[in-house]
């Protein structure tokens, strides 16, 4: 039976790892956790005079470097002067050279948000009149490429190592103290420590390149590493390494002196290890809470300890589940049904804590029911909730098997000392005979090995134990995928931040449009579109200036939902005055820059309520037409 199960286990593990790799690979660059909410000059605007500086406003505080804000002329030459600086609040600026000529300028930014994630983007504005530009902004991303993938993999492995280390140790100390002398359990916990330590060192090396150039060659740049150590994320990683040194001491005591103590002597040591282990585990969990989502935004003082409890609950449940799986499949020492029942109780308490803290975190990060479906964070959170529900359902099945589990192991354990005494007797009699002592000892060892194998076959033949093994294996499989989804979730912009940024940009755009309309008679139309492709959602904006009969300047801007310029192959515009049966008048604007098209001397033959139809093509086969009416003339 064991021989048929082992290949299935290996196959399932490989499939789950492949699924997790797919999740991490398709996650893409880390989404911005600080969103651009405004700029001066604004995106796509045409100003009469070159500004003295460019300023950007974000949804939260960001960290700047010398190259965080750049302004490029139409030929791609940098025209900013000096280092970026903080204007006030969450607004940051950079000075420009004086006497800039007319043309289209590109503003690029790459900063680090307060919750440690890189943020990058670009937009254009024009001085005097729009012009062609050699600058492409479509590639402006942060946290992407090989370095971004490696960083995401490091994050996944660090979470996995933490869960196995903390959960495995808690399982041994709280549920199955005999497991301290079991080699597979020792290897599991030590493996968790090694994984977390290696992943933390990898993240520390990658951090500078991940938030900067994204080049593999910069991974071992000592200057970048020195800069990282001065940041909040760097301090959190270093703190984690120091706590891992304390965790190494805890592991050596748990699997060394603790295992050798008698039952009476273990009581005091168990209490001390429990206190020390809890402090170290909470400190490790805090190294995430102090540098990521929980550390910024709404109620940060409450969110950080809640996040620590959440991580500890996850580790106790899933790490203990992994330890139970190893005990059921890899350990020669039988695990008692009482130990399984104790873990079942601990897991139930962990799930309660997990749900309570998860509800608070969801409210804090989303803020509205609509964010569940309208933001990527909310959609990933729905997937996570579904996986947790599935995991709880499988755990319920495991609890049922646990309740039916026969104590065959206990009876076997009672017989084991008798067999040991027989073996010892045989060994002793062998010694008395002198020359036959080695042979007697060898026979005793063979008999003991045969007895152990017989016990294992009897244990594995128990249908309740076999059912428990399968259900625990299924739980572990779901847990692996759940961990991958959680890793991607921690790299995704919270729904509340995304919606607040959209609202701020919409208010800014509306204010700007109203001001422009009042001052010059210009008309601005915003239309959402969805071509139905994999990347087909966005907003198209059409400007007519001065929106009167005769010649007009028309500008078309295409943006993604997050406000970034949308690089699409084609845009067409058609004007129709249905009351006079004029049109459609086809207009094919010229591409000026990524997400920006323009047409000059667009003739409006008469005043009226004109229908402006815009055809947007996002791929060779995906396109759509959206329209809106505007009073022109």
Image (cartoon, rainbow, N blue to C red):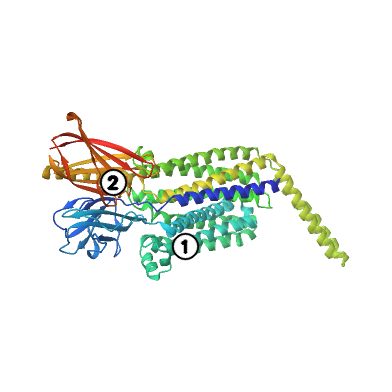
* Residue occupying image coordinates x 64% and y 53%: 178
In the rendered image, is residue 293 in sight?
yes
- How crowded is the residue under tag 1: few (<14 C-alpha within 10 Å), some, or many (20+)? some
Pick the front one: 450 or 155: 155
Quadrant placement of the C terminus: top left
Q: Is residue 70 above or below residue 327?
A: below
- Residue 323, image x and y in percent? 59, 51
User: Which of the 4 quarters of the picture holds residue 128?
Assistant: bottom left
* Residue occupying image coordinates x 36% and y 66%: 227
Q: Is residue 154 left or right of residue 130?
A: right
Pick the front one: 513 or 150: 513
Sooner in the amino-acid sequence: mark 1 or mark 2: 1
- Residue 547, image x and y in percent? 15, 41
- Residue 379, image x and y in percent? 41, 41
- How crowded is the residue under tag 2: few (<14 C-alpha within 10 Å), some, or many (20+)? many
Mark 1 — residue? 202
Count numbered badges in the picture: 2
Q: Furthest-bottom residue in view?
A: 222
> Helix, strand or loop at disc 1?
helix
Quadrant placement of the N terminus: top right
Mark 2 — residue? 558
């Amino acid at each position: 039976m064991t021989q048929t199960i082992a290949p299935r286990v290996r196959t399932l593990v490989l499939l789950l790892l492949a699924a997790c790799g797919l999740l991490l690979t398709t996650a893409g660059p880390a989404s911005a956790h600080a969103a651009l909410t405004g700029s001066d000059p604004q995106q796509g605007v045409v100003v009469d005079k070159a500004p003295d500086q460019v300023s950007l406003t974000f949804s939260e505080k960001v960290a700047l470097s010398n190259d965080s804000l750049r302004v490029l002329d139409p030929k791609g030459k940098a025209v900013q002067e000096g280092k970026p600086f903080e204007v006030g609040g969450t607004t940051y600026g950079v000075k420009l050279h004086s006497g800039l000529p007319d043309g289209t300028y590109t503003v690029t930014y790459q900063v680090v948000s307060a919750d440690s994630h890189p943020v990058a983007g670009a937009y254009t504005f024009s001085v005097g009149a729009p012009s062609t530009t050699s600058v492409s902004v479509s590639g402006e991303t942060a946290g992407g490429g090989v370095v971004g993938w490696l960083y995401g993999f490091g994050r996944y492995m660090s979470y996995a190592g933490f869960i196995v280390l903390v959960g495995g140790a808690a399982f041994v100390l709280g549920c199955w103290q005999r497991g301290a002398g079991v080699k597979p359990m020792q290897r599991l916990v030590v493996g968790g420590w090694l994984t977390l330590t290696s992943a933390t060192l990898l993240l520390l090396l990658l951090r500078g390149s991940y938030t900067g150039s994204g080049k593999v060659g910069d991974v071992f740049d000592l200057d970048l590493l020195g800069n990282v150590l001065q940041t909040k994320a760097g301090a959190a990683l270093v703190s984690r390494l120091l706590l891992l040194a304390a965790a190494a001491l805890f592991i050596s005591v748990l699997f060394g002196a603790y295992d050798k103590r008698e039952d009476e002597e273990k009581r005091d040591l168990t209490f001390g290890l429990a206190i020390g282990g809890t402090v170290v585990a909470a400190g490790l969990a805090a190294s995430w809470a102090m540098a990521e989502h929980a550390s910024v935004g709404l109620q940060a003082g409450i969110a950080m300890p809640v996040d620590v409890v959440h991580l500890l609950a996850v580790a106790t449940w899933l790490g203990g589940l992994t330890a139970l799986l190893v005990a059921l499949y890899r350990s020669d020492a039988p695990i008692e049904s009482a130990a399984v029942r104790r873990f079942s109780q601990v897991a139930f308490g962990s799930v309660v804590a997990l749900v309570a803290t998860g509800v608070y975190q969801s409210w804090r990060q989303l803020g509205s029911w609509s964010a569940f479906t309208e933001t990527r964070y909310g959609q990933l959170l729905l997937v996570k909730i579904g996986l947790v529900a599935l995991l709880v359902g499988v755990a319920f099945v495991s609890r049922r098997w646990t309740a039916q589990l026969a104590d065959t192991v206990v009876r076997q354990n009672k017989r084991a000392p008798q067999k040991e005494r027989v073996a010892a007797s045989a060994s002793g009699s062998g010694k008395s005979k002198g020359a036959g002592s080695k042979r007697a000892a060898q026979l005793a060892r063979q008999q003991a090995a045969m007895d152990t194998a017989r016990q294992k076959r009897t244990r594995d033949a128990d249908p309740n134990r076999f059912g428990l093994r399968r259900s625990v294996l299924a739980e572990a499989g779901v847990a692996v995928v759940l961990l991958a989804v959680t890793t991607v979730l921690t790299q995704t912009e919270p729904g509340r931040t995304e919606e607040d940024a959209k609202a701020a940009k919409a208010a800014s755009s509306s204010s700007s449009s109203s001001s422009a309309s009042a001052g010059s008679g210009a008309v601005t139309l915003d239309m959402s579109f969805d071509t139905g492709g994999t990347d087909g959602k966005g907003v198209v904006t059409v400007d007519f200036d001065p929106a009167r009969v005769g010649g007009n300047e028309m500008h078309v801007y295409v943006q993604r939902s997050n406000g970034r310029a949308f690089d699409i192959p084609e845009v067409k515009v058609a004007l129709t005055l249905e009351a006079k049966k004029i049109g459609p008048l086809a207009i094919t604007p010229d591409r000026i820059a990524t997400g920006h098209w323009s047409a000059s001397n667009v003739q409006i033959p008469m005043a009226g309520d004109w229908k402006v139809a815009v055809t947007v093509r996002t791929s060779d086969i995906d396109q759509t037409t959206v329209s809106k009416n505007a009073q022109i003339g």
